[in-house]
Amino acid sequence: MHIIEAAILGIIQGLTEFIPVSSSGHLIAIPKLLGWNDMGMSFDVALHWGTLVALLIFFWRDWAAILSSFWQHVTKGVPYTKDESGRSGRLLIPIIVACIPAAIAGKLLDKKIEAFRDRPFMILAIAGGLAVMAVVMLLAEKMGRRQRDISRMGYTDYVVIGIAQALALIPGVSRSGVTITAGLFRDLDRTASARFSFLLSMPVIFGAGLLKLKDMMKSAKMDPNVNKLGLHHNEILPWIVGFAAAAIFGYLAIKFLMNFLQKNSLKPFAVYRICFAVLMVGLFIMGR
């Protein structure tokens, strides 16, 4: 893989993993549009870990506060306080509970869906996911009352958003898009929906990254020409470039979206999704 390709794909992953426009759709469509070869499992791992680093850098204070608050509550009986910013230890167990549906779905379906990645009909599947999710996002904007913050969430909210996150396995749906949208349907305000969405995504991305890393190392044992991580010597630099680009642009995407949603709706992203879906259909018709 060329370094420029690695950088471009890393940028795309970083931006589209967190902006609700579907990272999987872009990472499949754009290489096909440009005639690039498949990036492979090892590069996919690099992008996964890059976006995880972006989350850790942006939300490390939140996680430090959540874990500290939880520890103080469990060991010393310190009561939880109402925290509208989403940094209370009371969120730790709900986040774990909400991750269960995505973990189960990922374990059962991820490899099966990945096996269809290069099939021609995947382009149409992604286009359908983009368009349907765009309509759902617009409905959420219209129907959601946006009256609650994270401190007023309950277990029904956690379970609904957790189940929604599992739907992100469907190509074209978008993890951030479906979880933020679910939050809006539950009458959360936009920034609360986005913050909880990102907190919820960290354990899932971490788990998925570990599984992909395990698979990559397993395949490395069967190939004497790669190192222990499954990388050929000429793949190391593109791997590093893709990882760094995903981390940097992922951080910028999170910062942008958190600021954007304070005063704006999801409508621009819904419009973009529809336009991109049309492009995908055109790509399919042209046979690229």
Image: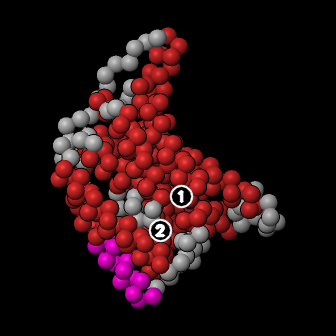
- In the picture, measured across the screen, residue 56 lies left or right of residue 279, that is right
Highlighted magenta segment, given as a residue range = 275-287
- In the picture, measured across the screen, residue 66 lies left or right of residue 39, that is left
Q: Quadrant of residue 183?
A: top left
Disc sitting over residue 27 in the figure: 2
Q: Find disc 1 in the rendering and name its residue.
A: 47
Given the image, on which type of amino acid does mark 2 rest? Leu
Q: Are marks 2 and 1 in contact (CB under 8 Å)?
A: yes
Given the image, on which type of amino acid does mark 1 rest? Leu
What is the residue that sits farthest to the right in this orientation?
A: 224
- In the picture, measured across the screen, residue 86 lies left or right of residue 229, that is left
Q: Nearer the viewer, residue 70 or 226?
A: 70
SS for tag 2? helix
Q: Which residue is painted at 75% across and 61% down in the image?
A: 220
Q: Nearer the viewer, residue 209 or 105?
A: 105
Q: Quadrant of residue 25?
A: bottom left
| Predominant SS of the magenta segment | helix
Residue 101 percent across, percent down from the top left = 49, 46
Does residue 276 belong to the magenta stretch?
A: yes
| Residue 249 can be seen, yes or no | no
Disc sitting over residue 282 in the figure: none
Residue 44 percent across, percent down from the top left = 57, 61
The quadrant in which the N terminus is found is bottom right
- Here the colouring is secondary structure
Of label 2 and label 1, which has the lower sequence position?
2
The CA distance from mark 2 to mark 1 is 11 Å
Does residue 112 belong to the magenta stretch?
A: no
Judge whether 110 appears above or below 186 on screen: below
| Residue 271 can be seen, yes or no | yes
Q: Which residue is painted at 33% across and 73% down in the image?
A: 277
Q: Nearer the viewer, residue 67 or 165?
A: 165
